[in-house]
């Protein structure tokens, strides 16, 4: 039972940054923006969270700076891809490469170390104990005592599903992706909806990056996002941006991540176990591609 509980808790922790980033990417997906800059947003947020927590001695300050760091990249993306109409793919790649170099440089300049900083001055995001839930057998240890950002991610999923499918904003957001010309002709600028979507993506990626460096672990290392932004993009594509589907896919990827760590205890090299989430991504994309091909064949028949 302890192993099972550990696997579930590990899957939840591993899924949280992917889920938060994917929820942010879902907004841009519906708005018709091909946003691959989530990887860079997560990485920048992770660094800013550690820097803010260390500098101000507060995890709350770290989370705030993480959001601001991700929003800064979102604003750059907006300036180039939305206002100047540059290629979204090229802009996203440029931001990811810029962030990788910038965080490496800032790590060495701010803390005077290379690779990893895990100083004692970093204030982590606390775990939250739910008094009544904690007493429930079996489920209690899994539902209670999680990091604060885990509960934020659950709330963000519920709010995102409501916003996208139950509000006027969500209707206009989806219209911006489905038929921007029609939305513009109705008097609602589709460009404004794309800007809102990217800002929301920046906030959620900021929360995901903060959890990554102040909750999942309590340190910052170079390139610590480790492809989670790309996995988030895969999750979005697999379920067409549906927040509930994104949550399920994120949990599956989180389970694959913790399974890779478990396999290391059986003397399997860490280089192979680290591939587990990415193998899961490729398998998921394969089945998605097969499903899309069957749908196209049915339409053409």
Image (cartoon, rainbow, N blue to C red):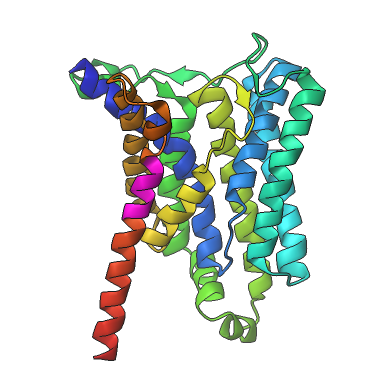
Q: Is residue 126 visible?
A: yes
Of residues 47 and 125, the one drawn nearer to the viewer in this rendering: 47
Position of 120 relative to 8 (above/below):
above
Residue 222 lies within the magenta run: no
Outermost residue, right direction?
A: 109
Image label count: 0
User: With 154 as the anchor, is 48 left or right in this view?
Assistant: right
Residue 123 percent coordinates (x, y): 62, 15
- The picture quadrant where one finds residue 288 is bottom left
**In the rendered image, which quarter contains the N terminus?**
top left
Residue at the spot 63% in from the left edge and 87% down from the top edge: 185
Chief SS of the magenta region:
helix
From the viewer's side, name the closer residue of 53 and 187: 53
Q: Is residue 69 above or below residue 31?
A: above
Depicted 259 relative to depicted 234: above or below = above
Q: Position of residue 27 (x, y in %)?
A: 53, 59
Q: Which residues are magenta?
A: 277-283
Please check the rendered image and state whether residue 281 is part of the magenta-colored stretch, yes or no.
yes
Q: Residue drawn 67% across and 75% down?
A: 189
Q: Which residue is found at the position 66% from the left and 12% from the top?
A: 119
Asked whether the viewer can see residue 143, the reply is: no
Image side of residue 154 versus residue 121, left or right: left
Q: Quadrant of the C terminus?
A: bottom left
């Amino acid at each position: 039972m302890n192993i099972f509980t550990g696997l579930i808790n590990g899957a939840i922790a591993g899924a949280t940054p992917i889920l938060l980033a994917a929820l942010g990417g879902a907004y841009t997906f519906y708005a018709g923006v091909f946003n691959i800059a989530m990887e860079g947003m997560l990485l920048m947020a992770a660094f800013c969270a550690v820097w803010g927590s260390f500098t101000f001695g507060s995890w709350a300050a770290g989370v705030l700076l993480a959001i601001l760091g991700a929003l800064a990249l979102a604003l750059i993306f907006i300036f180039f891809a939305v206002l100047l109409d540059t290629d979204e793919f090229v802009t996203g790649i440029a931001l990811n490469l810029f962030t990788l170099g910038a965080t490496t440089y800032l790590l060495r300049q701010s803390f005077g170390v290379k690779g990893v900083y895990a100083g004692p001055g970093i204030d982590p995001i606390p775990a939250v104990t739910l008094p009544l839930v904690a007493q429930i057998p079996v489920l209690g240890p899994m539902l209670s005592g999680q990091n604060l950002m885990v509960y934020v991610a659950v709330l963000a999923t519920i709010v995102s599903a409501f916003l996208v499918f139950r509000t006027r904003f969500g209707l206009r957001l989806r219209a911006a992706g489905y038929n921007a010309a029609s939305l513009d002709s109705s008097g609602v600028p589709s460009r404004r909806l794309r800007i809102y979507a990217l800002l929301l993506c920046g906030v959620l990626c900021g929360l995901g990056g903060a959890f990554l460096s102040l909750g999942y672990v309590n340190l910052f290392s170079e390139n610590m996002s480790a492809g989670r932004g790309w996995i988030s993009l895969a999750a979005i594509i697999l379920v067409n941006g549906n927040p509930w589907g994104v949550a399920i896919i994120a949990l599956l990827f989180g389970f694959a991540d913790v399974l890779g760590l478990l396999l290391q205890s059986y003397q399997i090299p860490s280089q192979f176990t680290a591939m587990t989430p990415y193998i899961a991504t490729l398998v998921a994309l394969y089945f998605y591609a097969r499903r899309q091909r069957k749908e196209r064949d049915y339409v053409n028949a």
